Amino acid sequence: MPVDTKRIRGPEESQSPLLFLSPGKVPEASSRQGVRGNGDARPVFARCGLISQAKGSAYLEAGNTKIICSVYGPREAERKDETDMKTGRLVCDFRLAPFSCLKRGAWIQGSEERDLSQTLQESLQPGVCLHRYPRSQIEVNVMVLENDGSILAHAVTCASMALADGGIEMYDVVLGCTLRQSGSTCLVDPSYSEEYGSWQEGYGEDQGCVTVALLPNLNQVSGLTADGEMREDILSDAVRSCMDGCHKLYPVLQQALMRAVKKKAPPPAK
């Protein structure tokens, strides 16, 4: 198995940093009492055009979840056998930084990241006018700097902002929202402890997680993933709640894109 020989190897014996946290700072599953309602999303900070070398880029921060995305292309496809004469190709690469999770990960892309890359591509592709870029490919690179839950939904939103910032023609921007269902309680935009905390207790009735990718102006769902076991009516309500969350996020995305456009626009002639 290949290893990175340029990195300084850590000590053979070490302890988790969580052991040195005060009891009040240890992350625990939250019921959101006095912080935000079960149907409220975390405040979102979004900016475009942060990576000068990329055609388009975006940075999104929701609570402690921090994601950066860069877009390159359209450029000539690397593999000629995958070239389409009538339409372009969207290539997505989803990465988790080794320091993004509580348990340090590896630089090599794992199976979870490959699955997230495929899901990200399937969610973004309906919103991009690929027929405008024949015989070419558009590359989308997403890096999660800190994982505090709902990374797939926020990655979809951040990648859509980067595509729009890069001038890629789109039918509509794509927004993502995640909902955690735990019995009769549903939590919109769950944190890491809310998203994975109760899974360790075992599977039960109406236990699951739903992520929706939405084209807000067209009101069309471009991607849907669901884990766990939920009844049909519970799943339908979860999808509707996620769609409402996407519509609430849309003004934040509009302001970030308008700010980027005004910054790139030339000053008015005197």
Image (cartoon, rainbow, N blue to C red):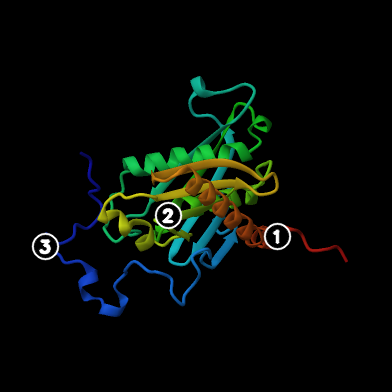
* Residue 92 falls left or right of residue 25: right
Q: Earlier in the sequence, mark 1 or mark 2?
A: 2
Q: Secondary structure at mark 3?
A: loop
Q: On the image, numbered disc 2 is attached to which residue?
A: 181
* Residue 198 falls left or right of residue 166: left
Q: Secondary structure at mark 2?
A: strand
Q: On the image, numbered disc 1 is attached to which residue?
A: 258
Residue sticking out furthest to the right: 270
Q: Badge 2: how crowded within 10 Å, few (<14), some, or many (20+)?
A: many
Measured as percent of width and height from the top left, residue 188 is found at 49, 59
Q: CA distance from mark 1 to mark 2?
A: 35 Å
Number of marks drawn: 3
Q: Residue at x 49, y 29 (%)?
A: 78
Q: Earlier in the sequence, mark 3 or mark 2?
A: 3
- Of badges 1 and 2, nearer the viewer stands 2
Q: Check contact, mark 1 vs mark 2: CB within 8 A.
A: no
Looking at the image, residue 59 lies above or below residue 210: below
Looking at the image, residue 131 lies above or below residue 191: above
Looking at the image, residue 125 lies above or below residue 235: above
Q: On the image, numbered disc 3 is attached to which residue?
A: 13
* Residue 133 falls left or right of residue 198: right
Q: Residue at x 69, y 41 (%)?
A: 171
Q: Amino acid at mark 3?
A: Glu
Q: Is residue 91 visible?
A: yes
Q: Nearer the viewer, residue 214 or 34?
A: 34
Q: Secondary structure at mark 1?
A: helix
Q: CA distance from mark 3 to mark 2?
A: 39 Å
Q: Residue at x 62, y 21 (%)?
A: 85
Q: Check contact, mark 1 vs mark 3: CB within 8 A.
A: no
- Of badges 3 and 2, nearer the viewer stands 2
Q: CA distance from mark 1 to mark 3?
A: 50 Å
Q: Nearer the viewer, residue 72 or 152?
A: 152
